Amino acid sequence: MLGQYYRRDFRFVTLEAEEYAKSINLTGDGKDIWVFDIDETTLSGLPYYAAHGFGAQPFNGTAFNAWAETATAPALPEGLKLYNRLLSLGFKVVFITGRPEKQRGITRKNLLAAGYRKWEKLLLRQPSDVMKASVVYKSEQRANLEKQGYRIQGNIGDQWSDLLGTNIGARTFKLPDPLYYIS
């Protein structure tokens, strides 16, 4: 995470996503969207994981949520650059995160502080979604977007559960994440 390879791989994926995005002819009706995950895609949990031994200690959801409540997660520079480029091309951005609804305000605050200033939707887990596998929850969210008339032109995330399932979009982009895996 601290070496050159993680950042290089991350940059490679976001550059590929940008090249793909430039090839799309948008309809101009505001329904062409790009789906972003949040943690380890747009915002970095690296400060939390560094303080907790990079996995040397078992993951503590309570401690992570307390850290998330500080709204201090920095932007992943390549994720922010892709986000800004997509907006300039005319895409709308939708964030789909596994964070709970009760963290909406703090997540919004953190996104804004990190430079993510505009989005179409910010979708968080509702209490009824808590027991759902991530791939099921995110598939349902994407299906709901398509029912609303949105076209998912791109989908980017650090976990396979961000990109698999149904209604994945026209193209997906998997970012590296050597810290953890969500099934």
Image (cartoon, helix red, strand yellow):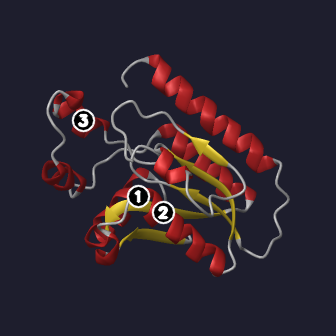
Apparent side of residue 125 relative to residue 57 in the rendered image (left or right) = right
Marks 1/3 in contact by CB < 8 Å: the verdict is no
Mark-to-mark CA distance, 2 and 1: 6 Å
Figure disc tally: 3
Residue 91 placement (x, y as % from top left): 69, 62
Badge 2 crowding class, 10 Å Cα cut-off, few under 14, some 14 to 19, many 20 or more, is: many
Q: Which mark is residue 134?
A: 1
Q: Which residue is drawn at 27% across and 55% down?
A: 71
Q: Which of marks 3 and 2 is nearer the N terminus?
A: 3
Which amino acid, mark 1? Ser
Is 7 or 99 nearer to us in this picture?
Answer: 99
Figure check: 8 above or below 183: above
Which amino acid, mark 3? Tyr
Marks 2/1 in contact by CB < 8 Å: the verdict is yes
Residue 93 visible in the shown view: yes
Mark-to-mark CA distance, 3 and 2: 24 Å
Marks 3/2 in contact by CB < 8 Å: the verdict is no
Badge 3 crowding class, 10 Å Cα cut-off, few under 14, some 14 to 19, many 20 or more, is: some
Q: Is mark 3 on a helix, strand or loop?
A: helix
Q: Name the residue under label 3.
A: 49
Which amino acid, mark 2? Lys
Residue 82 placement (x, y as % from top left): 61, 46
Mark-to-mark CA distance, 1 and 3: 21 Å
Is 170 or 108 nearer to us in this picture?
Answer: 170
Q: Which of marks 1 and 3 is nearer the N terminus?
A: 3
Q: Name the residue under label 2.
A: 138
Camera-side mark, 1 or 3: 1
Q: What element carries label 2?
A: helix
Q: Residue at x 58, y 31 (%)?
A: 11
Residue 118 visible in the shown view: no
Residue 8 placement (x, y as % from top left): 54, 24
